[in-house]
Image (spheres, grey):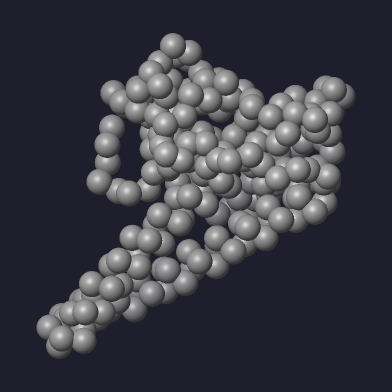
Amino acid sequence: MKTQIILSIVLLFTFSSCVDDYYGHPDDKEGILTSTNYVYSDDIRAEFLELQGAALEEEIKILGGAIESGNATPEQEERFQTAQDELSSTSKTLIEIAEFRELVYKGIPLPPPPPPCPKPRNCNDWLNFNYVTIPSGQSEFGLLIYDQNQNVIGQTEGKPTALVGVDGLLDYVVLIFDDTQYEGDILVKAFGTMENGTSFSYFIESSIN
């Protein structure tokens, strides 16, 4: 289950239970979200990108040293420029994610989220999650959760559905666990398609204890 990629740690986006009534879908006027029953996809994506950025910074440092010493190959010099471009793009996306989150909080009377879980990596809350909230504009979204033997123990079902009371900013999908007794490492993979046809994917590692 352990991968050599350092993209780990899940950040969870949770709202205070005192504002539960703001969120629901057209058939549920009392709301479907509580402060503990969902995960926000962009927090997972942001942590993926932050760790990806850290890896790029380390790579750029190593390549830069080779270039300064005059020992870099043409391939290394080309990769140095490409890695810088990738880091710039990653940083820009993280800013956009943060700005959208701020927009959500300004547009809706929400308190700041509690400290993220997990950080460190372990979190017992996964089995309590019934929904994944996502920024609107995604025609397809899926989340798969694998156990340490690469068996799927949880997955989303259906297409994104608009949440009521969030000014059209967020959608949600239902998350169902097939194994509600599992304890151990997990791999969480998110994937989907934007309305413009662009596909995306990202993943993180976590665990259930």
Residue 190 visible here:
no
Q: Residue furthest right?
A: 29
Residue 182 in sight from this viewpoint: yes
Q: Is residue 196 left or right of residue 74?
A: right
Going by the image, does 119 lie left or right of 139? left
Provide residue 74's location: percent of width, then percent of height: 19, 82
Residue drawn at (59%, 64%) of the image? 95
The residue positioned farthest toward the left in the image shown: 71
In the rendered image, the residue lying farthest to the top is 181
Image quadrant holding the N terminus, namely: top left
Residue 98 or 145: which is nearer the viewer?
98
Report the number of discs.
Answer: 0
Quadrant (top left/top right/bottom left/bottom right) for the C terminus: top left
Give above or below for 141 relative to 30. below
Place of residue 135 in the rendered image (x, y in percent of width and height, measured from the top left): 67, 47
Residue at the image position 38 percent from the left and 18 percent from the top? 183
Q: Position of residue 4 (x, y in %)?
A: 25, 46
- On the rendered structure, is 33 left or right of 187? right
Residue 164 in the figure: left or right of residue 174: right
The residue positioned 37% from the left and 48% from the top of the image is: 7
Is the residue 127 above or below the residue 188 in the image? above
Residue at image position (31%, 26%) is: 148
Residue 132, quarter of picture: top right
Q: Position of residue 29 (x, y in %)?
A: 87, 24
| Nearest to the observer: residue 5 or residue 20 | 20
Residue 2 position by quadrant: top left
